[in-house]
Image: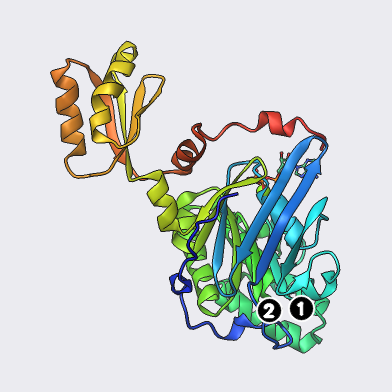
Amino acid sequence: MSRPAESDPPGEAKVARSSRATRVDGSAIDGAAIVATGLNKNFGDVEALSDVDLEVGTGTVLGLLGPNGAGKTTAVRVLATLLKPDSGSATVAGFDVLREGNALRENIGLAGQYAAVDENLTGAENLTMVGRLYGMNRAGARRRAAELLDRFDLSDAGDRAAKTYSGGMRRRLDLAAALVAKPPVIFLDEPTTGLDPRSRLALWETIEGLVSDGTTVLLTTQYLDEADRLADRIAVIDHGRVIADGTPDELKDRIGGERLEVTLADYGRAAEAASILSGLSEDEPVVEHDAVKLTVRERKGAIVEAVQMLSEADIGIDDLGLRRPSMDDVFLSLTGHAVEADEDDEAGPG
Ligand SMILES: Nc1ncnc2c1ncn2[C@@H]1O[C@H](COP(=O)(O)OP(=O)(O)OP(=O)(O)O)[C@@H](O)[C@H]1O
Ligand SMILES: [Mg+2]
């Protein structure tokens, strides 16, 4: 896997960590909060994790970015001790995933891709139950539940069964449940998938709040903008392999600037158009069906220039626009192909 040669100044991460930067017993975490080395996990002939190395500095956020079936949930499950790797090793908060599972689990919170709330219990009951599982007394668990309901804007719904909650409320309750024991490390598996833009933004702000308290976060996502906003570093994963990692800026530099997409009136002239437009880009434009896509270094004037170049060659344009890089662009520039449908991955057992 690739790691940037020079080590990044840790100053990239927001500083001033405090309350959540220690283990639940108050001891300091020596070194990185999450370290994984050479993790492998196969399901039949599907390589869900292949030689995965990850490192997440204490108090920082790692975004694990990848398409469906990339291995994100598998990585989280291994690090949260829910699944044994076939080989490789990992520590979380300094505890070994294989040998120190109990201590490790006390120091992590996990908000899953599939929210793990009990539908028939109320929000308050769900959180109180989690507190009791962590060994709090009844009063303490209730107090903590009330605190979290308030913090997640669920106080009014606290006495309603979770099955009456909206998707966004359920996500918030699930995240609250992960925080009951004030763990220093939390895993968030696609925390905002399926949320509307407003709920998404609210959840981002909540996560930022946790991070400013010193919590270490490993967040999986399919959205580049989410990783960009929340993560200090991003690891891109595909077919179980980490294919790139770096800060969001390093990654964006590798992907390049904004994307210009031109849809042609006559797809027969796509190759010609690509060659004409290649002057606007440092990389070769890509032709997909009747569209030519390229990365422009200079946003300003790119559209006007493209229109002029093509009209001089008498090539008709159906549509044209500039947009920010998406995860597809990340994959295109890292692998030379777009995100694939993962049908063939899913052919394995299960
Ligand atoms: N229990 C299992 N049995 C068989 N195959 C599995 C199992 N769990 C995961 N896989 C396979 O391993 C691969 C990685 O799955 P994983 O759930 O980690 O992907 P993901 O990145 O979380 O995807 P998504 O974005 O869809 O949640 C997939 O091909 C999946 O089908
Ligand atoms: Mg998943």
* Residue under label 1: 131
Residue 164, by quadrant, is bottom right
At which x and y percent is residue 143?
69, 86
- Disc 1 secondary structure class: helix
**Residue for badge 2:** 145
In the shown orientation, is residue 325 left or right of residue 339? left
Indicate left or right for 118 with 34 as reference: right
Q: Which mark is residue 80?
A: none
**Which three-letter amino acid code belongs to the residue tagged 2?**
Ala
Picture coordinates of residue 305, whole percent (x, y): 16, 33
Instruction: Please say if 166 is above or below 172.
Output: above
**Badge 2 element:** helix
Q: Residues within 10 Å of mark 2 (few under 14, many from 20)?
A: many
At a point 77% along the width and 73% down the height, the residue shown is 95
| Residue at 79% across, 43% down | 42
Name which residue type carries label 1.
Answer: Gly
